[in-house]
Image: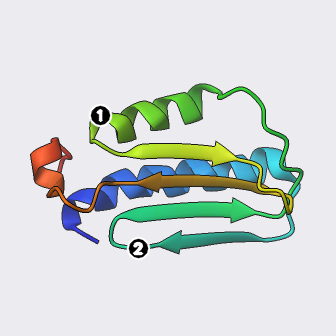
Amino acid sequence: MPGELRQLFGWVVREGVTNVVRHSRAHTCRIAVTAMSVTVADDGRGAKAADGNGLTGLRERVQAAGGTVTADAPAGGGFRLHAAMPAHEPAADRGVPA
């Protein structure tokens, strides 16, 4: 992944794992990272509640850098947090700190 995205994606992983530990009652958690996205998914309760301060702040950080955040409960159960950046634009041009 571009170096500029490491800190931002670190926030996504921390928030996602914190939510797994605090709320999900999951048995497993999977983290998938690509050059332009990160996903934290678990097999827990999967209830979609209103965004708390953590998800709201995370969404604001990622959107300010030009990306998107989705948080959902997939049909198969569990919970998934996904952040993605557009691949066509260098992160430095979106104001992502290095």
Left or right of residue 88: residue 32: right
Left or right of residue 79: residue 12: left
The residue drawn where x is 10% and y is 48% is 93
* For the residues bearing labels 1 and 2, Cβ distance under 8 angstroms: no
Q: Position of residue 98 (x, y in %)?
A: 16, 54
Quadrant in the picture for residue 6: bottom left
Residue 21, compared with residue 68, is above or below; it is below
The residue drawn where x is 41% and y is 30% is 60
Residue position marked by numbered label 1 in the rendering: 64
Q: Amino acid at mark 2?
A: Thr
Left or right of residue 23: residue 39: left
Task: Identify the image quadrant of the N terminus.
Answer: bottom left
Q: Amino acid at mark 1?
A: Ala
Residue 29, compared with residue 61, is above or below; it is below
Q: Position of residue 66 (x, y in %)?
A: 28, 42
Marks 1 and 2, Cα distance to the nearest angstrom?
Answer: 20 Å
Left or right of residue 64: residue 31: right
Residue position marked by numbered label 2 in the rendering: 34
SS type, badge 2: loop
Residue 48, compared with residue 45, is above or below; it is above
